[in-house]
Amino acid sequence: MDNLIGKKIDGRYELLQLIGVGGMANVYKARDVIDGRNVAVKVLREEYASNEEFVRRFKNESKAIAVLNHPNIVKVYDVSFSEKMQSIVMEYIDGITMKEYIDQQKVIRWKEAVHFTVQILRALQHAHDKGIVHRDIKPQNIMLLEDGTIKVMDFGIARNARSQMATITDKAIGSVHYISPEQAQGEKTDEKTDLYSVGVMLFEMLTGKLPFTADSAVSVAIQQIQAKAKRPRELNPDIPEGLEQITIKAMQKDVTKRYQSAAEMLRDIDDFKRNPSIAFEYKYLSAEEEEVHTAIKKRADAQTAKSGKMSRRKKKQAEYEDDEDVQIVYKTPYLAMLGGIATAFALVTCLFVFLMFYYNNPFISVEEVSLPNFVGIQYESVQNSSKYSDFKVIVEETVYNEEYEKGVICEQNPKYPKTVKIGSEVRVKVSSGAKKITIPEFSGQEATQVFAQLDEMGLDFVESRINHPTVRGGYVIKTEPTVGSEVKSGTTVTVYVSLGAQQVLKNVPSVTGIYVDDAKSILESAGLKVGEVSMDPRSDEPYGTVLEQDPADGDTVPAGTAVNLRVSQGDRVVSRLVLTVPLPTSIDREVKVSAYLDDMEVRTETINPKNSANWRPSFTGDGIGRVSIYIDDELYMEYIVDFEEGVHEIDTDFSAEFQE
């Protein structure tokens, strides 16, 4: 049995069952004991917890998905990173993977495939707009709900599209049947990488087959780079031509011929949905058709060139034979023009040679000197010092730099050490000092969103979880440094995240065997309150004696918990009386209406007064009593009731104050 089942993460998420096993993490169905909802908790497997690469990828996923908020992307509620465990708390999806659905259906109807693809593209467009490239789009990472809704998940190898950094592990990662040619070659990946994978998925849904298969992953990767897939309509003739063209364009190996954005692909799909018989301007041939087409085109071009040359020769010969004057008209300007061009060329050449010798005589020897190391020296000192007069020091740009103070040269070209000629140019970059970042107001924001913002700002962060009486669990209380502070890039910010109000636990005192009013006083003094009070007519105990309590004596419960009491009716003769309470019909919303008999709650309901003009609570008792009616915990009316006579009268009326 999994040793994590039954455990709570951060004292909040109780792991119920294992629902998924991945390459680096397991996914559990869990219960959020605070919000009372089911969640999915992704936990980095124990054997990878000490592997920096896997931990980095796991954190990448939490950072990537934290900035995303889209109905077709799985939501992240919370993250937790400690020395012992790394976990991501996500939306629980009750469905199956798209891979399972494809395996069940074999070939998916094209209308359904389009419906799924549109949702995937909308999710990717949202991610791409945020600068996030998924890089592992495949049916295994797409969840399908019963109502046909798509949820994209598993951003484990996602990377910011603007980032120029990539580790060796990153370069050729992803599922080989769906990766793009550039990904298979370890080249730079961007939004168009995800669109290639979507094209492969659409191909698989429409045909029931993958475009490339082989005995090894390496062979499949080579096919992704070099081979040409069959046209989908060769495998399934029922596919409309326009949809085939969309699929093939998404799968183009040349990224310039592929869709350039998810929005562009969505536009073509929208055109296709409006007119399924559409045929787009771009057309793609099979490998055999393309080979034949190329051969025919080459032969036609050669024949055209040959016939053109023959016709020009015959035409010119006819002109010469018909009119000798025409021959002179053709030749004289042509020769004059050639002569003019030759003369101009000679003059330009002479001028160039003269200027070259004048400004940079190659036969004059220029002394060479050692290039100083300007890095770390104030640019102003270089300008004012005669020791650097042998060089032309030119400021190329001013840049932020963490290492060098403002005005100090932080980079030079050519680089030191080097021997150069006297008078050579040296281009330098001058530091404008460390970039200052102002800490914004994060209080009250969701922690995962704050972490993503800090990461985008170039700041590191550590999370500290503490209780807070008013800030909801998972939301930021404060940061250190505080709001408005100016810090350098890379500074570590401590983010204090609320665990919610600290629960105060109380021991339930024993109130059985005593009068109900005394029981109420005892419970309130213990930090608890009286809940439902039910009368037991079968008891021989004196009227008002508490016979039973729930929770029981000695239980530990949170402060403010309601304790329900069963009370003896004794031998008193009790009567039942029903009140008709008029409600303020000007209120058109749900309100809580409560009835109390002699300060003990008898009945509570949620009612819309607009729909129910009267409320009819019933009471049992004897003698004279006072009934209090509350709306949303504010006193509305009070009645004096006589159980023996079965009558009542209004004692206090605040109903006029409840008109809206």
Image (cartoon, rainbow, N blue to C red):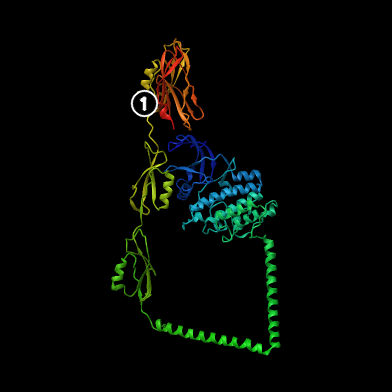
Q: Quadrant of residue 552?
A: top left
Mark count = 1
Figure check: 38 above or below 118:
above
Q: Position of residue 311 (x, y in %)?
A: 70, 79
Q: Would residue 178 be seen by someone viewing this image from the given angle?
A: no
Q: Would residue 257 be seen by someone viewing this image from the given angle?
A: yes
* Residue ID for mark 1: 527
Mark 1 packing: few (<14 Cα in 10 Å), some, or many (20+)?
some
Figure check: 234 above or below 76:
below
Q: Position of residue 625 (x, y in %)?
A: 41, 16
Figure check: 567 above or below 159:
above
The kind of residue tagged 1 is Gly
Q: Quadrant of the C terminus?
A: top left
Q: Position of residue 270 (x, y in %)?
A: 60, 52
Query: Observer-nearest residue: 138 or 513?
Result: 513
Dot 1 falls on a residue whose secondary structure is loop
- Give the residue displayed 69% in from the left and 87% down from the top: 320
Q: Position of residue 300 (x, y in %)?
A: 70, 71
Query: Observer-nearest residue: 115 or 63?
Result: 115
